[in-house]
Image (cartoon, rainbow, N blue to C red):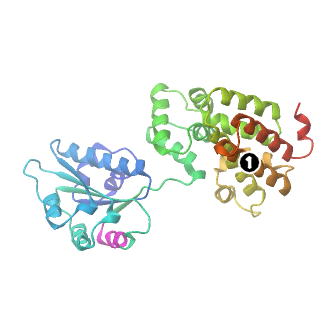
Amino acid sequence: MGDGAVRLVSMTATPASDAHRVLGSVVLVTGSAEFLAERVVSQAREAIRDDDADADVTEVEAAALDAGVWLELTSPSLFAASRGVVVRGLDLLPEPMHEQLLVYTATPADDVAMVLLHPGGTRGRALLDRLRKAGAREVKADAPKPWLVAGWASAEARRLGRSLDDAAAEALVAALGDDLRTLAAAIEQLAADNPGRRLDADLVRAAFEGRAEVKSFDIADRAIAGDVAGALELLRWALGQRVPLPLVTSAFAVNLRRLIKLTYAPGGLRDTDLAREVGCSPYQLRRLRPQTRGWDPAGWAAAMDAVANADAAIKGAGGDGGLALERMVLAVVAAGPPGRAGTMA
């Protein structure tokens, strides 16, 4: 197998000229990111059918495999020159089938494309190691760490032949969260709706203005910065739009935890290492650093207590959820550096 075969099962588009190279191979997809795993399966399906439009593609659960089913799956098809086999849940493959799968992986059939899906975790790890040694080509389908999601979004745009700079990628993640399927669909929509236009932060914000997640983090940012009037104005907008209340307390908790980690992170770290320590992207560090100034341990503790109390109140321990959130905003502002409480008019 050459480089084309690697590209075929990567997270990039599949060149038509490489379509036939998926045949005669065993691709091992490992990781819990279902969207990335399904992309590999889709690319394999396309490649098989580019080679033979009538090809059979069969999916089966590993737990249901036995010697008879395996023989049927890997034998030549009576109706097509090529076939694909997708085996899901490899961690549940019956022990008696391990050796049979390993023997096949070492000498795969020329007219069969085999895709094995393992959801990650420790179960079946020994089998994975043996499959790698037997010649299976592994594709990682792990979700990126939180601080790398924006980078993944930029790479996804490049996959479509477009550019999404750091600021735009961060704005998109802030708007939509870290679900890869949602981000990929949004990038595809932006690219399709704006041919020839640069996909910048202004475009992203215009397209996704008013998303609940954005407003929740904006409320937290303003409260932490001491802007009580701005935070309360955005909070009232969110309450009027029936934004789920836990989104607001969650945004406060995430922002405060990141700032506390940044405040007490070891000195001398490079931005990439510091971002990993904090749980954000290097780009986000530039926004977070100014927010740590003037805070002390007692202030951080008081702010986190206020968020915990509000979260308990909106989940049943109190009455008026909106009032609980307003009190949280006021408490977070008051917990900040001296002088900020004076902005509460």
Q: Position of residue 320 (x, y in %)?
A: 71, 36
Quadrant in which residue 132 is drawn: bottom left
Q: Position of residue 38 (x, y in %)?
A: 36, 48
Q: Residues within 10 Å of mark 1 (few under 14, many from 20)?
A: some
Which segment did they paint magenta? Answer: 127-136
Q: Position of residue 238 (x, y in %)?
A: 66, 30
SS majority, magenta: helix
Circle 1 — which element? helix
Quadrant in which residue 323 is drawn: top right
> Extreme left residue here?
78
Q: Is residue 199 magenta?
A: no
Q: Residue at x 37, y 47 (%)?
A: 39
Q: Nearer the viewer, residue 125 or 27?
A: 125
Q: Residue at x 71, y 53 (%)?
A: 257
Q: What kind of residue is marked 1?
A: Asn
Q: Is residue 337 above or below residue 62?
A: above
Q: Which residue position holds label 1? A: 309
Q: Quadrant of the C terminus?
A: top right
